[in-house]
Amino acid sequence: MRRFIAVGVGSALVLAASLVTTSVAGAAPPTTYIPITPADLVVYNTLPAAGQFVEIDQSGGTGGGSVSLVNGPGTSRGSLQMTTTGTSSHWSVFNLDHDNMPLSNLTSLSYTSYTNDTSDTLDPGLQLVIDPGNTSGLDAGVTFSTLNFEPYLQPPSDPVVHNIWQNWNVMNGVVWGTHLTGAPNSAPISWSTFLADYPNATITDGIGVNVGSGWSAMTGNVGTLTVGTSSGTDIYEFEPVAYLQITTSSLPNGSANDAYSAPLSAVGGNPPYRWSVSHHGLPAGLKLNKTTGVISGVPKKNDSGTYSFTVKVVDAKVKAKHQPSTRNTATEALSITIS
């Protein structure tokens, strides 16, 4: 049963986020980049589509503050911005893609944040709504808890610093859970200890970020949220518009006279995409499919070495009434080593 803590209700625009998965045969599980644009930030009045985030005003509309997608701040191209206007403001933004999954299935969990709070204590936290799962012993019978990672509670070696972007590795930090005597806010415990104490814990209402509940006025931003499992990693990227970008950062090596195939991937913009590569960049015997973005072929004998080149992707034209057609372009420097 889904059981969010509060009820902000209103109209919602339900459009699925576009997904781009990058993987190489025989390599590690794939990484999926999921851009979250305004259409993917919905109000909690229905179950969201895959890739969407539910926006929840935990004050029931009486606390003030706001949630939006913005450019910046700092070096970030875009982010999820959450503001509080005083102690009655409280906002949560949740994703349900990993609902009903055992907590132990997570292999990575991290996010990036930015705060303007000069006290260096008010920074967006990460939350998971869980069923702790113990039927005997510690907290037996408790079926609902909000598991919290809060930056200000982390060890002194990992302090909150205002007005810069910071990356938080939740599984390397300490957490606490509501309704749990074994992991109270006053004595947070490590992620590994939590899993040992609550081995059957299950995510029941998703993973999200949170600000407020007794906080003073502040503005906090989240740039990315990364959720990894044994089957792959999802990277949610908050952006006010769907920028075009190449998500392939490296290519596998190849061998002369052996078949080679590796995909290039992009996210954002206006698909379908058109790919190209700098002149004379690829090893002899390899070609880039301009439509699919797959580099394939058989490297020629005696063509060993490292080949550096630049790939470019262009999206489809966007036509607007009384406006010139526009399209986006992205480039990435890559290399392939042939042995």
Image (spheres, rainbow, N blue to C red):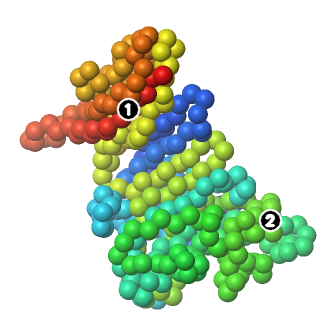
Residue drawn at point x = 57 percent, y = 54 percent:
227
User: Mark 2 and mark 1 in contact (Cβ < 8 Å)?
Assistant: no
Crowding at label 2, few (<14), some or many (≥20) Cα neighbours within 10 Å? few
**Where 157 falls versus 102 (above or below)?**
below
Q: Earlier in the sequence, mark 1 or mark 2?
A: 2
Q: Quadrant for residue 68, please give it.
A: bottom left
Q: Secondary structure at mark 2?
A: helix
Decide which of 119, 284 is in the foreground and name it.
284
Instruction: Indicate the amino acid at tag 1.
Output: Ser
Residue drawn at point x = 65 percent, y = 73 percent:
175
Instruction: Indicate the amino acid at tag 2.
Output: Ala
Q: What residue is pinned by disc 2?
A: 196
**Where 184 falls versus 75 (above or below)?**
below
Q: Which mark is residue 335?
A: 1
Q: Which mark is residue 104?
A: none
Crowding at label 1, few (<14), some or many (≥20) Cα neighbours within 10 Å? some
Decide which of 185, 48 is in the foreground and name it.
185
**Where 71 falls versus 155 (above or below)?**
above
